[in-house]
């Protein structure tokens, strides 16, 4: 199995949501290896979608089924396997601006942000 099989694209969350609540929500389905919040390269503002990678692809599928439509800070999260939908389908941020960008558990900087989180 490729590492892409364990990666989800999740979106439609508030501008101010950072990696912590996303990681907490999705890790309820299994261990995560990385959460990256996509940001605009010029403004460094959240684009309100993220890539969430599970250590096991089966957990990614379980999370997608269980958490699609779940509420996070008043917004319904939408998710699918990465690569199936275009990021433009995830536009529609709500709320205040400003958030940290990404975290990785044991990985390096992926070029999307500068935050880091280890549980």
Image: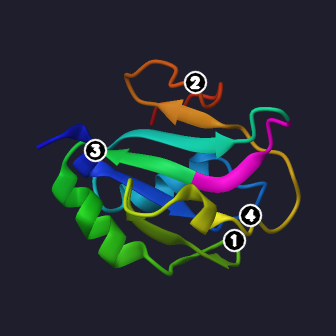
Which quarter of the figure has residue 17?
bottom right
Chain-order first, disc 1 or disc 4: 4
Give the left or right position of residue 9, taking residue 50 as reference: left
In the rendering, at what x and y percent does residue 19 appear? 59, 45
Mark 2 to mark 4: distance in Å?
21 Å
Comparing 27 with 102, the one in front is 102
Judge left or right: residue 79 versus residue 54: right
Extent of the magenta region: 43-49
**Is disc 1 in contact with disc 4, using a CB cutoff of under 8 Å?**
yes
Disc on res. 4:
3
Of callouts 3 and 1, the N-terminal one: 3
Q: Nearer the viewer, mark 1 or mark 4?
A: 4
Look at the picture and state if 4 lies above or below 14. above
Q: Which residue is mark 1?
A: 73
Q: Which residue is mark 4?
A: 14
Quarter of the figure with the N terminus: top left
x 67%, y 48%: residue: 18
In whole angstroms, how far apart are the C-alphas of marks 3 and 2?
17 Å
- Disc 4 element: loop
Looking at marks 2 and 1 on the same chain, the residue that comes earlier in the sequence is marked by 1
Crowd tier of the residue under label 4, counting other residues whose Cα lies within 10 Å: few below 14, some 14–19, many 20 or above? many
| Residue drawn at (73%, 69%) of the image | 92
């Amino acid at each position: 199995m490729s590492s892409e099989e364990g990666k989800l694209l999740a979106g439609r969350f508030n501008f101010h949501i950072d990696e912590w609540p996303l990681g907490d929500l999705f890790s309820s389905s299994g261990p995560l290896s990385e959460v990256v919040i996509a940001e605009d390269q010029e403004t460094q503002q959240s684009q309100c979608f993220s890539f969430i990678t599970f250590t096991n692809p089966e957990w990614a599928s379980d999370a997608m089924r269980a958490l699609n439509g779940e509420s996070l800070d008043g917004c319904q999260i939408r998710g699918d396997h990465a690569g199936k939908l275009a990021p433009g389908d995830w536009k529609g941020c709500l709320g205040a601006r400003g958030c940290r960008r990404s975290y990785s558990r044991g990985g390096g900087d992926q070029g999307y942000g500068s935050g880091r989180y280890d549980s």
